[in-house]
Amino acid sequence: MPTIQDLVTVPLNGVTANVIAGQFYENIPRGARVRVYAVGAATGVRATILNGIPVVQDQAIKFNATSQFPTVPDDLLTEFVAPGGKLDIRFRNTTAGNIVTGFRVDLN
């Protein structure tokens, strides 16, 4: 099961580019089971996930000031069977400060 895990700083009142752009598993096969976990260091971060169709649109993610990486299975944001193609994950910050956000993507 491939896993993509990283930290990204979401700029104040801004949106990140696709956080998995350029990763080996950015393009996923049809029928793959995708699990996305995310956690922010503060409140105010929202996630959008696209895979040909909108999977999650502007949904608030959990925050945990003591942990930088998501905890499996507690911080599960969404789980879906992929229609295939490019996976696009973006985070939006609704506050006036930069927020570190950790994410993990598991493909099955």
Image (tube, rainbow, N blue to C red):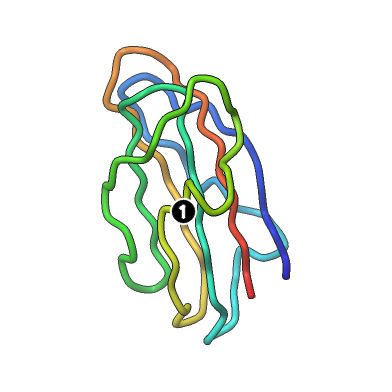
Q: Is residue 95 left or right of residue 32?
A: left
Front residue (pair 61, 55): 61
Residue type, mark 1 in image: Leu
- Residue 35 at x, y percent in the picture: 52, 63
Q: Which residue is painted at 34% across and 65% down in the image?
A: 55
From the image, tell me which residue sits under label 1: 76
Residue 14 rendering spot, x and y as whole percentages: 35, 28
Tell whether 94 sits left or right of 100.
left
Identified at 30% across, 13% down, the residue is 96
Q: Nearer the viewer, residue 90 or 101?
A: 101
Give the left or right position of residue 29, taking residue 91 as reference: right
Provide residue 26's location: percent of width, then percent of height.
Answer: 61, 63
Horizontal side, residue 95 vs residue 98: left or right? left
What quarter of the picture does the N terminus occupy?
bottom right
Question: Which residue of the protein is positioned furthest toward the front in this rendering?
Answer: 74
Identify the residue at image location x=46%, y=79%. Answer: 81
**Nearest the eye: 59 or 22:** 59
